[in-house]
Amino acid sequence: MATPESEILDVESIRDDFPILDRDIGGKQLVYLDNAATSQTPEQVVDAITEYYYETNANIHRGLHQLSQEASVAYEDAHDRLAEFIGASGGREEMVFVRNTTEAENLIAYAWGLNELGPGDEVVMTEMEHHSSLVTWQQIAERTGAEVRYIRVDEEGHLDMDHAAELITDDTQMVSALHVSNTLGTINPVGELADLAHDHDAYIFVDGAQAVPTMPVDVEAIDADFYAFSGHKMVGPTGIGGLYGKKHLLEEMDPFMYGGGMIRKVEFEETTWHDLPWKYEAGTPAICEGIAMAKAADYLDDIGMERIERHENALAQYTIEQLSTFDDIDILGPSAGEQRGGLVSFTLDTVHPHDISEILNDYSVAIRAGDHCTQPLHDKLGKTASARASFYIYNTREEIDALVEALDAARDLFE
């Protein structure tokens, strides 16, 4: 069945917003397929950054002059915009700006985990977790005496939800799970995991780094207690991300960092904290980056998150279809026909993923090679590494054809 015209992205018009895509590398036009690591940034977001530094640049919440007032309002409004973008009705009081998803994970682990976990308590994660989650909770568990347990991933790259129901018990205090796997492309049933956690009076932290840029996200429909994402994966700048937290939980927790901006009153004897979300944003924040991240949300909403999700899945399906014609390529994650995030990881029997990436670079095709910060998952799959092609709003089928052509060249070189 043909896709209705209203559901198809105008990719050519979108590409016009990204001048970097016109770059030639070694005489060939850039094919950028490393979006799961970092997306490119459109002119509209770059213009927002330029406008801030040309017209508004000042510190926030500390000055009575015009520039400080303008910067403060824009930065505060950006919190509201990002809260709206992920379905958080509490606005800025439920949206903390952080550097990235990793910092958000550490904020909760240190501000909540160090105070609440102890011997006999458990943190449940998945076998497909990113190192930012796995390593963080692993270290917190070592400090507190808690135990970390892992939900199995089956051969098709799905979570074993029966195993999840067994692992999540009354001893579980936190469930931390990826919304979309950055290696397998699996879209995890985080709403079901939230239900399991809440049935046992546990909390759930959702890593939405690969989900927020690529699909509609509603944190309240998921019933996530905490949800994190990064600006640089959603056509925004680097060094900025968002942490959603239910208001009553953020109010109960102690701050993660201390200093200016997060205090209400300081005396020699004691200090009281500022209102949400500033309680968790010590020091001068990434003001411009926060404002630009809100502009990125506007840009994606103008395109339509449902359309973006369909586009990415279509590119992933086309890639699987093309790669499946080769007997020597092993594709990781859900099989063809299943809804998945916009990435495909694979191995080629005769060529190491690092060599694949280097050879593809000669053809101006940019992909990622390695363990993608999921080394334990690769160990489970019996892979030292994998190659990963990841797509976004400006990618085309023709670029996937270029990927396949370059893979043919890599195969021939190593025969």
Image (tube, rainbow, N blue to C red):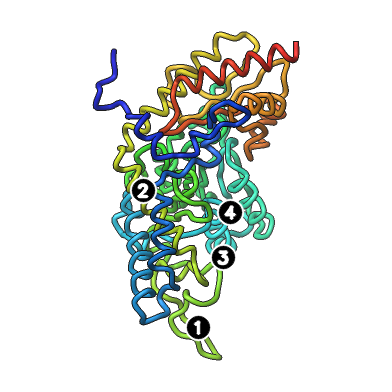
From what the image shows, is residue 398 above or below residue 173?
above
Q: Which residue is mark 2?
A: 297
Camera-nearest residue between 404 and 246: 404
**Is label 2 or label 4 in front?**
2
CA gap, disc 4 and disc 3: 12 Å
Q: Amino acid at mark 4?
A: Asp
Q: Amino acid at mark 1?
A: Thr
CA gap, disc 4 and disc 1: 31 Å
Q: Position of residue 145 (x, y in %)?
A: 66, 57
Q: Amino acid at mark 2?
A: Ala
Q: Position of residue 47 (x, y in %)?
A: 40, 53
CA gap, disc 2 and disc 1: 36 Å
Labels 4 and 1: the sequence-earlier one: 4
Camera-nearest residue between 50 and 376: 50
- SS category of the residue bearing label 1: strand
Q: Residue at x 51, y 77 (%)?
A: 260
Q: Residue furthest bottom?
A: 268
Labels 1 and 3: the sequence-earlier one: 3
**Is label 1 or label 3 in front?**
1
Labels 4 and 3: the sequence-earlier one: 3
Q: Residue furthest right?
A: 415
From what the image shows, is residue 404 above or below residue 66?
above
Mark 4: few/some/many CA within 10 Å (<14, 14-19, 20+): some
Q: Which residue is mark 1?
A: 271
Mark 3: few/some/many CA within 10 Å (<14, 14-19, 20+): few
Q: Amino acid at mark 3?
A: Asn
- SS category of the residue bearing label 4: loop
